[in-house]
Amino acid sequence: MSKKKIGEVILDVQNISLRFGGVKALSDISFDVREHEIRAIIGPNGAGKSSMLNCINGVYKPQEGSITFRGQTFKHMNSRQVAELGVARTFQNLALFKGMSVIDNLMTGRNLRIKSNLLLQALRWGPAEREETEHREKVERIIDFLEIQAHRKTPVGQLPYGLQKRVDLGRALAMEPQVLLLDEPMAGMNVEEKQDMCRFVLDVNDEFGTTIVLIEHDMSVVMDISDRVVVLDYGKKIGDGSPGEVRANPDVISAYLGTSH
Protein backbone atom coordinates (compact mmCIF):
# COMPACT_ATOMS: atom_id res chain seq x y z
CA MET A 1 0.00 0.00 0.00
CA SER A 2 1.48 3.37 -1.00
CA LYS A 3 2.07 5.98 1.68
CA LYS A 4 -0.65 8.59 1.46
CA LYS A 5 0.30 12.22 1.02
CA ILE A 6 -0.63 14.46 3.95
CA GLY A 7 -1.29 18.03 2.80
CA GLU A 8 -1.26 21.51 4.29
CA VAL A 9 -3.22 22.55 7.38
CA ILE A 10 -6.94 22.56 6.51
CA LEU A 11 -8.33 23.19 10.03
CA ASP A 12 -6.56 25.27 12.67
CA VAL A 13 -7.91 25.37 16.23
CA GLN A 14 -6.34 28.18 18.28
CA ASN A 15 -6.63 28.80 22.04
CA ILE A 16 -10.20 27.51 22.40
CA SER A 17 -11.76 27.95 25.84
CA LEU A 18 -15.35 26.94 26.57
CA ARG A 19 -17.25 27.49 29.80
CA PHE A 20 -20.72 26.52 30.94
CA GLY A 21 -21.46 28.87 33.83
CA GLY A 22 -18.52 28.37 36.20
CA VAL A 23 -17.49 25.03 34.69
CA LYS A 24 -14.58 25.04 32.27
CA ALA A 25 -15.15 22.40 29.60
CA LEU A 26 -12.09 23.39 27.52
CA SER A 27 -9.05 25.47 28.50
CA ASP A 28 -6.82 27.08 25.89
CA ILE A 29 -6.81 24.18 23.40
CA SER A 30 -4.78 24.49 20.18
CA PHE A 31 -4.10 21.91 17.47
CA ASP A 32 -4.29 21.64 13.71
CA VAL A 33 -5.58 19.12 11.18
CA ARG A 34 -3.82 18.52 7.88
CA GLU A 35 -5.53 17.73 4.63
CA HIS A 36 -6.10 14.01 4.02
CA GLU A 37 -5.04 12.86 7.49
CA ILE A 38 -6.92 10.91 10.14
CA ARG A 39 -6.59 13.04 13.29
CA ALA A 40 -7.75 11.40 16.52
CA ILE A 41 -8.89 13.21 19.67
CA ILE A 42 -8.64 10.94 22.71
CA GLY A 43 -8.93 11.23 26.47
CA PRO A 44 -10.76 9.75 29.46
CA ASN A 45 -14.51 10.35 29.97
CA GLY A 46 -15.25 14.02 30.64
CA ALA A 47 -12.04 15.18 28.95
CA GLY A 48 -13.92 17.59 26.62
CA LYS A 49 -13.65 15.63 23.36
CA SER A 50 -17.28 15.99 22.19
CA SER A 51 -17.30 19.62 23.36
CA MET A 52 -14.32 20.21 21.05
CA LEU A 53 -16.17 18.72 18.07
CA ASN A 54 -19.22 20.82 18.98
CA CYS A 55 -17.05 23.95 18.82
CA ILE A 56 -15.65 22.95 15.43
CA ASN A 57 -19.07 22.33 13.87
CA GLY A 58 -20.80 25.39 15.34
CA VAL A 59 -23.01 23.77 17.99
CA TYR A 60 -21.11 25.53 20.80
CA LYS A 61 -19.68 29.05 20.69
CA PRO A 62 -16.38 29.13 22.63
CA GLN A 63 -15.76 32.20 24.80
CA GLU A 64 -12.14 32.45 23.64
CA GLY A 65 -10.09 31.39 20.66
CA SER A 66 -10.72 30.91 16.97
CA ILE A 67 -11.16 28.14 14.40
CA THR A 68 -9.84 28.59 10.87
CA PHE A 69 -11.01 26.35 8.04
CA ARG A 70 -9.19 26.65 4.70
CA GLY A 71 -7.95 30.12 5.64
CA GLN A 72 -11.39 31.38 6.71
CA THR A 73 -11.69 32.12 10.42
CA PHE A 74 -15.07 31.68 12.06
CA LYS A 75 -15.92 32.63 15.60
CA HIS A 76 -19.72 32.71 15.52
CA MET A 77 -21.01 30.38 12.82
CA ASN A 78 -23.96 28.07 13.24
CA SER A 79 -23.94 24.39 12.27
CA ARG A 80 -25.53 24.99 8.89
CA GLN A 81 -22.95 27.60 7.89
CA VAL A 82 -20.12 25.29 8.96
CA ALA A 83 -21.72 22.43 6.98
CA GLU A 84 -21.94 24.68 3.91
CA LEU A 85 -18.19 25.31 4.21
CA GLY A 86 -17.63 21.54 3.95
CA VAL A 87 -17.58 20.10 7.49
CA ALA A 88 -19.90 17.14 8.27
CA ARG A 89 -20.49 15.41 11.60
CA THR A 90 -21.76 12.13 13.00
CA PHE A 91 -22.95 11.94 16.59
CA GLN A 92 -22.26 9.55 19.46
CA ASN A 93 -25.99 8.91 19.81
CA LEU A 94 -27.59 8.06 16.50
CA ALA A 95 -29.73 10.90 15.15
CA LEU A 96 -31.27 8.98 12.26
CA PHE A 97 -34.91 9.04 11.13
CA LYS A 98 -35.82 5.57 12.35
CA GLY A 99 -39.11 5.29 10.41
CA MET A 100 -37.53 6.29 7.10
CA SER A 101 -35.70 3.97 4.71
CA VAL A 102 -31.93 3.85 4.38
CA ILE A 103 -32.00 5.66 1.03
CA ASP A 104 -34.30 8.41 2.36
CA ASN A 105 -32.02 8.92 5.38
CA LEU A 106 -29.05 9.33 3.05
CA MET A 107 -31.05 11.74 0.87
CA THR A 108 -31.46 14.04 3.90
CA GLY A 109 -27.68 14.44 3.74
CA ARG A 110 -28.10 16.00 0.27
CA ASN A 111 -30.38 18.80 1.54
CA LEU A 112 -27.63 21.44 1.51
CA ARG A 113 -26.97 20.72 -2.16
CA ILE A 114 -30.59 20.80 -3.38
CA LYS A 115 -31.12 24.03 -5.33
CA SER A 116 -34.74 23.80 -6.52
CA ASN A 117 -37.47 25.22 -4.29
CA LEU A 118 -39.88 23.13 -2.23
CA LEU A 119 -42.80 23.51 -4.63
CA LEU A 120 -40.78 22.22 -7.59
CA GLN A 121 -39.46 19.41 -5.41
CA ALA A 122 -43.00 18.46 -4.33
CA LEU A 123 -44.25 18.49 -7.94
CA ARG A 124 -41.06 16.71 -9.10
CA TRP A 125 -41.23 18.86 -12.19
CA GLY A 126 -38.56 19.71 -14.76
CA PRO A 127 -35.26 20.78 -13.21
CA ALA A 128 -36.31 19.47 -9.77
CA GLU A 129 -36.86 15.96 -11.13
CA ARG A 130 -33.48 15.99 -12.91
CA GLU A 131 -31.80 17.28 -9.77
CA GLU A 132 -33.39 14.59 -7.60
CA THR A 133 -32.22 11.90 -10.04
CA GLU A 134 -28.65 13.22 -9.78
CA HIS A 135 -28.81 13.26 -5.96
CA ARG A 136 -30.21 9.72 -5.88
CA GLU A 137 -27.37 8.51 -8.12
CA LYS A 138 -24.81 9.96 -5.69
CA VAL A 139 -26.61 8.36 -2.74
CA GLU A 140 -26.73 4.99 -4.53
CA ARG A 141 -22.95 5.17 -4.99
CA ILE A 142 -22.52 5.68 -1.23
CA ILE A 143 -24.88 2.74 -0.55
CA ASP A 144 -22.69 0.56 -2.79
CA PHE A 145 -19.52 1.86 -1.14
CA LEU A 146 -20.85 1.04 2.35
CA GLU A 147 -22.14 -2.36 1.19
CA ILE A 148 -25.71 -1.79 2.36
CA GLN A 149 -27.44 -2.44 -1.01
CA ALA A 150 -29.65 -5.17 0.51
CA HIS A 151 -31.11 -2.66 2.99
CA ARG A 152 -31.80 0.30 0.68
CA LYS A 153 -35.56 0.35 1.34
CA THR A 154 -35.51 -0.99 4.91
CA PRO A 155 -36.64 1.41 7.67
CA VAL A 156 -33.46 2.29 9.57
CA GLY A 157 -35.04 1.42 12.92
CA GLN A 158 -35.26 -2.23 11.84
CA LEU A 159 -31.53 -2.56 11.15
CA PRO A 160 -28.95 -3.92 13.61
CA TYR A 161 -27.00 -1.25 15.50
CA GLY A 162 -23.78 -1.71 13.51
CA LEU A 163 -25.61 -1.11 10.22
CA GLN A 164 -27.38 1.94 11.67
CA LYS A 165 -23.94 3.40 12.46
CA ARG A 166 -22.96 2.72 8.83
CA VAL A 167 -26.07 4.57 7.61
CA ASP A 168 -25.12 7.48 9.88
CA LEU A 169 -21.70 7.56 8.23
CA GLY A 170 -23.36 7.41 4.81
CA ARG A 171 -25.60 10.37 5.56
CA ALA A 172 -22.55 12.45 6.53
CA LEU A 173 -20.75 11.33 3.34
CA ALA A 174 -23.79 12.37 1.28
CA MET A 175 -22.91 15.98 2.19
CA GLU A 176 -19.60 15.51 0.30
CA PRO A 177 -17.58 16.97 3.18
CA GLN A 178 -13.96 18.03 2.98
CA VAL A 179 -13.62 17.35 6.72
CA LEU A 180 -15.61 14.61 8.46
CA LEU A 181 -16.01 14.73 12.26
CA LEU A 182 -16.69 11.26 13.70
CA ASP A 183 -17.84 11.12 17.33
CA GLU A 184 -17.18 7.58 18.56
CA PRO A 185 -18.21 5.81 15.34
CA MET A 186 -17.43 2.40 16.90
CA ALA A 187 -19.10 2.87 20.29
CA GLY A 188 -21.20 -0.14 21.31
CA MET A 189 -20.00 -2.33 18.45
CA ASN A 190 -18.79 -5.90 18.59
CA VAL A 191 -15.33 -6.84 17.28
CA GLU A 192 -16.53 -7.69 13.76
CA GLU A 193 -18.56 -4.46 13.44
CA LYS A 194 -15.53 -2.45 14.63
CA GLN A 195 -13.32 -4.09 12.02
CA ASP A 196 -15.87 -3.20 9.30
CA MET A 197 -16.13 0.41 10.49
CA CYS A 198 -12.32 0.76 10.64
CA ARG A 199 -12.14 -0.42 7.05
CA PHE A 200 -14.80 2.08 5.93
CA VAL A 201 -13.11 4.98 7.78
CA LEU A 202 -9.80 4.13 6.09
CA ASP A 203 -11.52 3.77 2.70
CA VAL A 204 -13.33 7.13 3.06
CA ASN A 205 -9.98 8.73 3.86
CA ASP A 206 -8.21 6.95 1.01
CA GLU A 207 -10.76 6.77 -1.83
CA PHE A 208 -12.68 10.02 -1.22
CA GLY A 209 -9.62 11.90 0.07
CA THR A 210 -11.74 13.06 3.02
CA THR A 211 -9.92 14.52 6.03
CA ILE A 212 -11.17 12.84 9.21
CA VAL A 213 -11.23 14.03 12.83
CA LEU A 214 -12.10 11.07 15.02
CA ILE A 215 -13.06 10.63 18.67
CA GLU A 216 -12.66 7.02 19.74
CA HIS A 217 -12.28 5.20 23.08
CA ASP A 218 -10.77 2.01 21.67
CA MET A 219 -7.04 2.74 21.89
CA SER A 220 -6.04 -0.14 19.59
CA VAL A 221 -8.28 1.37 16.87
CA VAL A 222 -6.83 4.85 17.39
CA MET A 223 -3.24 3.62 17.27
CA ASP A 224 -3.91 1.53 14.15
CA ILE A 225 -5.68 4.06 11.93
CA SER A 226 -4.62 7.56 13.07
CA ASP A 227 -1.87 9.67 11.57
CA ARG A 228 -1.70 12.02 14.58
CA VAL A 229 -3.37 12.06 17.98
CA VAL A 230 -4.26 14.94 20.32
CA VAL A 231 -4.97 14.01 23.95
CA LEU A 232 -7.31 15.92 26.26
CA ASP A 233 -7.78 15.47 30.01
CA TYR A 234 -10.11 17.57 32.16
CA GLY A 235 -10.46 20.07 29.29
CA LYS A 236 -6.70 20.59 28.88
CA LYS A 237 -4.36 19.34 26.15
CA ILE A 238 -1.79 16.95 27.62
CA GLY A 239 -0.35 15.36 24.47
CA ASP A 240 -0.10 15.77 20.70
CA GLY A 241 1.85 13.82 18.12
CA SER A 242 2.12 10.53 16.27
CA PRO A 243 0.50 7.43 17.84
CA GLY A 244 3.96 6.26 18.96
CA GLU A 245 4.79 9.61 20.60
CA VAL A 246 1.46 9.76 22.38
CA ARG A 247 1.72 6.16 23.58
CA ALA A 248 5.09 6.97 25.23
CA ASN A 249 3.97 10.30 26.77
CA PRO A 250 4.08 9.99 30.62
CA ASP A 251 1.24 12.53 31.08
CA VAL A 252 -0.98 10.48 28.78
CA ILE A 253 -0.06 7.24 30.56
CA SER A 254 -0.91 8.71 33.96
CA ALA A 255 -4.22 10.18 32.72
CA TYR A 256 -5.32 6.80 31.36
CA LEU A 257 -4.07 4.79 34.32
CA GLY A 258 -5.40 7.35 36.79
CA THR A 259 -2.14 7.45 38.72
CA SER A 260 -2.00 11.23 39.10
CA HIS A 261 -3.42 14.50 37.76
Image: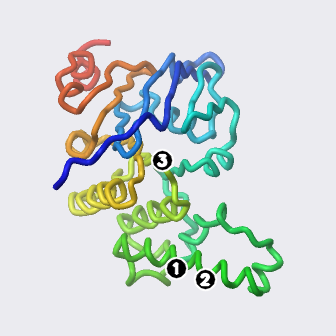
Q: Quadrant of residue 37?
A: top left
Q: Which residue: 68% across, 46% down?
A: 81
| SS assignment at label 1 | helix
Q: Which mark is residue 74?
A: none
What's the distance in space between the residues labelled 3 and 1, CA to CA?
Answer: 22 Å
What is the quadrant of the C terminus in the image? top left
Asked if residue 100 can be seen in this view, the reply is: no
Tell me if 144 is positioned left or right of 3 in this view: right
What's the distance in space between the residues labelled 1 and 2, CA to CA?
Answer: 6 Å
Q: Which residue is mark 2?
A: 133
Nearer to me, 60 or 87: 87
Tell me if 20 is positioned left or right of 44 in this view: right
- The reply to whether the C-beta atoms of the residues labelled 1 and 2 are less than 8 Å apart is yes
Asked if residue 173 can be seen in this view, the reply is: yes
What is the quadrant of the N terminus in the image? bottom left
First in sequence: mark 3 vs mark 1: 1
Name the spot of residue 5 as percent of width and height, x first. Answer: 29, 45
Q: Which residue is mark 1?
A: 137
Q: Which residue: 31% across, 32% down?
A: 229
- For badge 3, the amino acid type reads Val
Q: Which mark is residue 179?
A: 3
Name the spot of residue 252 as percent of width and height, x first. Answer: 26, 22
| SS assignment at label 2 | helix
Name the spot of residue 67 as percent of width and height, x first. Answer: 57, 30
